[in-house]
């Protein structure tokens, strides 16, 4: 069929089968696709949102702990405030939200402020924050550590801060202590009773002596009261590597810890 061209030709192109197919597809209206299907098929970035942002409430529940260390002149007071999530429900959970350290000693003020701000930021971030305990308790002071009340060894001031955070997390149920077996409890109670009996016997003997007694022979009972909760231990006790408490004594030829029940002889 002949076609008459009345206008001047300015250019031309050959229509291919692909062009015809493209024009045919454009003529057919696209079917509507559900938004859920599109979002599911669209590749997503590898970003995990822990939870939505939580604003600080007007009132928080807190606890304050005292640190009396030989490394600082004045006592330090550590305050940890908690936020209660899902309050009043079966899923109620108490989590640390912020931490403050106050003291008259100013020589450590700079790094204490930095540390507490970073810790508070980690608390607010959410997730598993218990790793802070292990990281802080592993910090050692190059000048040497010290023993706090109860005979527990602290390798540094930061480590004692970590121990306080651990104690607080245990009190709110965020960290759970492995319970001793009934057999371990029985052995520990028996060892403590033996030391109590020795201390009592030594005290009775000293009351009948009017002159200053000589130094006790090796293996003799020491004049020390061992409390039921293990708050005080014999002066000759050494450091237990398991619980870091100066409560390891030699009894019946075996090294036994009067605090955690560890025994070198099993």
Image: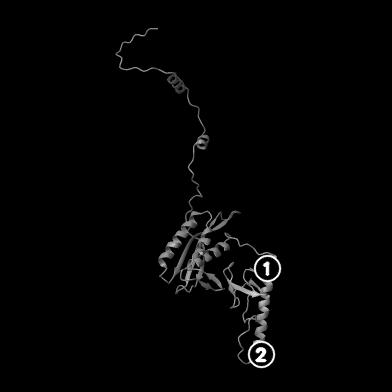
Q: Residue furthest bottom?
A: 210
Give the Cα distance between marks 1 and 2: 35 Å
Question: Considering only vertical position in the picture, is 2 above or below 266?
Answer: above
Q: Is residue 43 left or right of residue 217?
A: left
Question: Which numbered circle lies on residue 208?
Answer: 2
Q: Residue furthest top?
A: 1
Mark 1 lies on residue: 185
Question: Which numbered circle lies on residue 176?
Answer: none
Residue at x-position 46% and y-position 57%: 121
What element does badge 2 sit on?
Answer: helix
Q: Tag 2: Cα neighbours inside 10 Å, few (<14), some, or many (≥20)? A: few
Question: Considering only vertical position in the picture, is 236 above or below 98?
Answer: below
Q: Nearer the viewer, residue 21 or 27?
A: 21
Quarter of the image for residue 177 reads bottom right
Q: Nearer the viewer, residue 75 or 190?
A: 190
* Residue 41 percent location from the top left of the image: 51, 36
Residue at x-position 53% and y-position 73%: 147
Question: Considering only vertical position in the picture, is 49 above or below 237?
Answer: above
Q: Is residue 257 left or right of residue 122?
A: right
* Residue 77 percent location from the top left of the image: 48, 69
* Residue 243 percent location from the top left of the image: 58, 67
What element does badge 1 sit on?
Answer: helix
The mark nearer the N terminus, 1 or 2, is 1
Quarter of the image for residue 238 reads bottom right
């Amino acid at each position: 069929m002949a076609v008459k061209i009345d206008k001047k030709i300015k250019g031309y192109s050959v229509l291919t089968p692909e062009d015809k197919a493209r024009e045919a597809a454009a003529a057919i209206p696209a079917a509507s696709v559900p938004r859920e299907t599109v979002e599911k098929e669209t590749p997503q970035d590898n970003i995990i949102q822990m939870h939505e942002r939580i604003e600080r409430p007007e009132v928080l529940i807190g606890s304050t702990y005292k640190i009396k260390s030989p490394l600082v002149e004045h006592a330090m007071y550590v305050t940890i405030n908690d936020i209660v999530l899902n309050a009043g429900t079966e899923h109620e959970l108490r989590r640390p939200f912020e931490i403050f350290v106050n003291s008259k000693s100013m020589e450590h003020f700079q790094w204490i402020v930095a540390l507490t701000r970073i810790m508070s930021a980690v608390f607010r971030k959410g997730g598993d924050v218990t790793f802070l305990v292990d990281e802080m308790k592993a910090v050692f002071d190059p000048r040497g550590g010290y023993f706090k009340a109860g005979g527990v060894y602290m390798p540094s001031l930061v480590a004692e801060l970590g121990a306080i955070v651990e104690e607080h997390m245990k009190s709110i149920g965020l960290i759970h202590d492995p319970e001793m077996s009934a057999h371990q409890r029985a052995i520990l109670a028996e060892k403590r009773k033996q030391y109590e009996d020795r201390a009592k016997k030594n005290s009775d003997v000293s009351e009948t002596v009017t002159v200053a007694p000589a130094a006790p022979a090796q293996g003799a009972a020491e004049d020390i009261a061992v409390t039921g909760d293990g708050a005080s231990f014999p002066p000759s006790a050494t450091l237990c590597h398991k619980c870091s408490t100066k409560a390891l004594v030699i009894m019946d030829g075996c090294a036994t810890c009067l605090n955690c029940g560890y025994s070198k002889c099993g």
